[in-house]
Image (tube, helix red, strand yellow):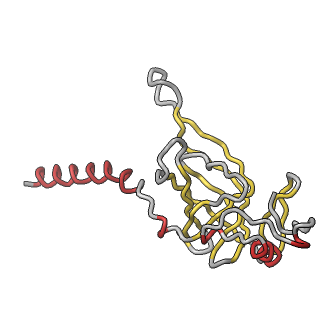
Amino acid sequence: MRSCFVRTLSVSAICLLLAMPAIAGKYKPDDYPLRVHIVERNGVRHYYHPGYWAGGAQLDKVDGLGAANLFENGQPLGFDFDYVCGEPLTPQRGYETFPARWKKQGRELEIMMPKMGGKPDDMNSCELKVAMKQDTVYIRRNGQVREEPAARFKQWMVRHQYDPEHGMNEPVRASGAAQAGDDTGAPE
């Protein structure tokens, strides 16, 4: 009787483990209301060698550090982060952001990144351990990462109709004086 229970429990555990990747692969955008723009990052890839005859090294994990901005409730705020993920952080272009949610408020964010070569809803997740800045964001100007007051960057966002939380992922060129060279707050 006991061995039957142990076998049933073992089979149930194996089925659950096999189902985990399928469950984890389901990305629901409504579960990720925040947006994260990674301004700067570095990472180191770690490989394991399953054996000389197994076909070579396989990626085990990637870890690193970086600087990013969080868009939450219409407000931008910078943060520093470190991470350990199963895949490299997907490169971002221009103003692109990742969907995100808090895992531990103010300390840990989970971002969703598209899988390279995958379908549009195929995503990898990565957890970032964060140190939030006070009233500051990060910008990139002339190849350099700099800090700027969050209020100043928010003014730029309003002027350029940039709101990644609401699908406005590309800034609109401002008219008048702002177009004449006032790119204050503009990331590169």
Q: Going 38% across and 50% down the picture, which residue do you hit? A: 21
**Where is 56 relative to 20, above or below?**
above
**Where is 43 relative to 162, above or below?**
above
Q: Going 75% across and 76% down the picture, which residue do you hit? A: 158
Q: Total label count?
A: 0
Q: Going 53% across and 35% down the picture, which residue do you hit? A: 48
Occupied quadrant, residue 5: bottom left
Q: Position of residue 171 (x, y in %)?
A: 73, 65
Q: Position of residue 68 (x, y in %)?
A: 71, 62
Q: Position of residue 61 (x, y in %)?
A: 56, 44
Q: Farthest residue toward the left?
A: 1
- Quarter of the picture holding the N terminus: bottom left
Q: Farthest residue toward the top?
A: 53
Q: Farthest residue toward the front?
A: 176
Q: Nearer the viewer, residue 163 or 5?
A: 163
Q: Going 66% across and 77% down the picture, which residue do you hit? A: 74
Horizontally, residue 54 falls left or right of residue 145, namely left
- Quarter of the picture holding the C terminus: bottom right
Horizontally, residue 6 falls left or right of residue 165, namely left
Q: Position of residue 73 (x, y in %)?
A: 63, 79
Occupied quadrant, residue 162: bottom right
